[in-house]
Amino acid sequence: IAITGKSTEDLIPTSLAEDENHTIWLGTMGSGVLQCTEGAKKFEVVANASMTAPKLPHDYVRKIYANRKGSIWVGTQQGLCEIEIASKKIINYQHDPAVKYSLSQNSIYDIFTDQSGNLWVGTYYGGINISYAKNTPFTVVQATGKPEGLGSNVVSSIYNENGKGLWIGTDAGGISFKNNTTGNYEHYRNSVSDLNSLGSNLVKCIFKDSDDNIWVGTHGGGLNLLNQNRTGFTRFKRS
């Protein structure tokens, strides 16, 4: 990988996204956000924490997400950032104790927009933050300890299964599936006595393949495949 005016020796990629113009956006651990336009042969630094304000909240980027409204959303260790593709304008969103509907927590794990254009942001111990329209205050969804609620406030992964609901992976709480029909959360967790349960409650990623299979990557519990009747998992672990 070539980068204009920067050495690649210490570059640590963390997240990748492609926008509607086929520009590749690269999130890194310690170097901010880079981009490579279609036909270009090098990445250029677009945003980092060393720029003149407005600047990236932090150079540790956990998530890059391209929406369909001409923006790139960037989740960092110290806040959420929106980069307008055309102008490169940077808008930051951070927790403010004095503002009731600000971001609930600055450490961002995942970003997602659903079919209605609502923005979902998974945070570390701040639960889920939802913005129902651009630049509106955040609605915060957090674990309450009730069966119908979110399983944990550490939200590490969000996957939209169109027409059915949202798969929300957490650290320590397993998976919470938000059912579109009932509006409630259904939970999938590890049980030591059940080998068909989720392999670990530390969920890192969720993905649906072309055959409609739901795959779950975990820490310590291997790769998990949800069975067809959605009552248990088949675990795949390194032998």
Image (cartoon, grey):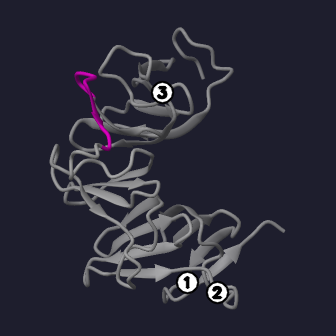
What's the amino acid at mark 1? Asn
Residue 88 picture quarter: top left
Per the rendered image, the range of residues in magenta is: 85-95
Disc 2 to disc 1: CB gap under 8 Å: yes
| 87 with respect to 46 (left or right) | left
Is residue 38 located in the magenta-colored stretch of the structure?
no
What's the amino acid at mark 2? Asn
CA neighbours of label 1 inside 10 A, class few (<14), some (14 to 19), many (20+): some
CA neighbours of label 3 inside 10 A, class few (<14), some (14 to 19), many (20+): many
On the rendered image, what quadrant is the C terminus found in? bottom right
Q: How many marks?
A: 3
Secondary structure under tag 1 reads loop
Secondary structure under tag 2 reads loop
Residue 142 picture quarter: bottom left
> 24 or 129: nearer the eye?
129
Residue 145 picture quarter: bottom left
Residue 136 numbered tag: none
Is residue 94 located in the magenta-colored stretch of the structure?
yes
Most distant residue in the top direction: 5
Which residue is tagged 2? 196
Which residue is tagged 3? 32
The residue that appears at 39% across and 61% down in the rendered structure is: 127
The residue that appears at 45% across and 58% down in the rendered structure is: 125
